[in-house]
Amino acid sequence: MAAQNDYKFQGWLALDPESVNGKMEWQTFEPKTWEETDVDIKVTHCGICGSDIHTLRSGWGPTLYPCCVGHEIVGTAVKVGSKVENGIKVGDRVGVGAQAASCLQPDCEECSNNDECYCPRTVETYNGKYPDGSKSYGGYSDYTRVPSHFVFKIPDGISSADAAPLLCGGVTVYSPLVRNGAGPGKKVGIIGIGGLGHFGLLFAKALGSDKVVAISRNSLKRDDATKMGVDGFIATEEDENWAEKNARSLDLIICTVSSAKMPMAGYLELLRTHGVLIQVGAPDEAIPAFNAFSLILRGAKLGGSDIGSPGEIRAMLDLVAKQRIKPWVQTRPLKSANEAIKDMEANKARYRYVLVNEAHAES
């Protein structure tokens, strides 16, 4: 298939923090400087991630406006450099997650140990800057350009709409589950039943954990969690003495909540001796304080996790294809991105919105 050359880079751009209120504007942008390791992608699908909302409003720090968000990208490779990795060819269905680049130097401890996502010289898929000063722009767009090390072939057994949110939301919980031993012999809790949390429940079950418990503020999502296969449910604002009644019951907890008001001390009570709580939700504010004895008296650990490595993304995609794991997604047209982000902010998604570039998805 011949490379396509008659395209331009345009998308929904955030110009200031007001963009989070549905005020992004459709404009052209200048992609990163072309290198022979790059891939140009015609975007067909892009998931809406909570990170997009934080970035639109400069919640995690000043955003480099203008900014085109979206880092759960699936589309077709239309231009491929002569030095690309991963065997990518023009016409391949490919995806990109939250990371577009790292240093990839042999003296980098992270990159040389398959931990590229922790490289201190990471370039994020949007709102980042490459070493030459050019900016990264995301997938609320017609086309995007990304270094091939972070571009992945999508397995035939996964639809594009399902694949998109896996590339950030999925791997963000898959990585800490796998790295902390989720599977046979482990009892796992997932805090928050949303875009990230629903992936956590699906993956904890798929990995063969002995018990999977959903933890939410109330029981409104209990039926959905049951359909996802959970073995237990805790509603922290409804179940009386929930922490005491469920104390020392879980080996591993993944917390997907991005709230500065979460009952962290209560969550820690749920850990068994030598249990681990991994925080993946990132509130704009500091997480709540807790007494050090919550960890000391259990020999417990509190840690964090950030997305996943390219190797973990490929392993996750293989698991999803082989076990036919079905994410809960709702598609929205790209042309309605402003309305979709407002609905996302209002917690209406069940459980992941995916923008569809209808012109490209039909071709």
Image (cartoon, grey):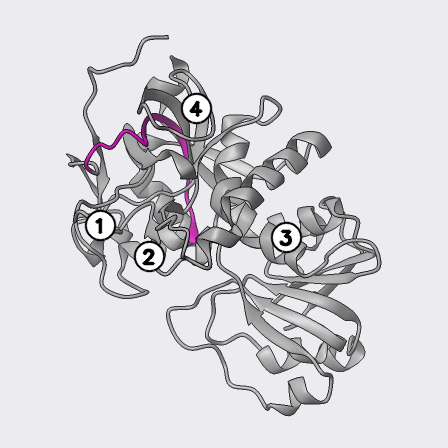
Q: Give the range drawn in magenta.
A: 33-50
The amino acid type found where label 1 is placed reads: Pro
Q: What residue appears at the point 73 percent right and 84 percent down from the top-left corner?
A: 298
Q: What residue appears at the point 83 percent right and 54 percent down from the top-left corner?
A: 184
Residue 280 placement, left or right of 35: right
Task: Indicate the quadrant containing the C terminus: top left, top right, bottom left or bottom right.
Answer: top left
Q: Mark 1 points at which residue?
A: 131
Q: Residue 121 carries which label?
A: 2
Asked whether the beta carbons under mark 1 and mark 2 sit within 8 Å of each other, the answer is yes
**Distance (Cα) linking label 4 and label 1:** 24 Å
Q: Compare marks 3 and 4 and give the one earlier in the sequence.
A: 4
Q: Which residue lies furthest to the top in this view?
A: 1
The amino acid type found where label 2 is placed reads: Arg
**Distance (Cα) linking label 3 and label 4:** 30 Å
Please determine whether, in this image, residue 321 is positioned above or below residue 68.
above
Asked whether the beta carbons under mark 4 and mark 2 sit within 8 Å of each other, the answer is no
Q: Compare marks 4 and 1 and give the one earlier in the sequence.
A: 4
Identify the element where label 3 is drawn: helix
Q: Mark 4 points at which residue?
A: 88
Task: Indicate the quadrant containing the N terminus: top left, top right, bottom left or bottom right.
Answer: top left
The 10 Å Cα crowd at callout 3, few under 14, some 14 to 19, many 20 or more, is many
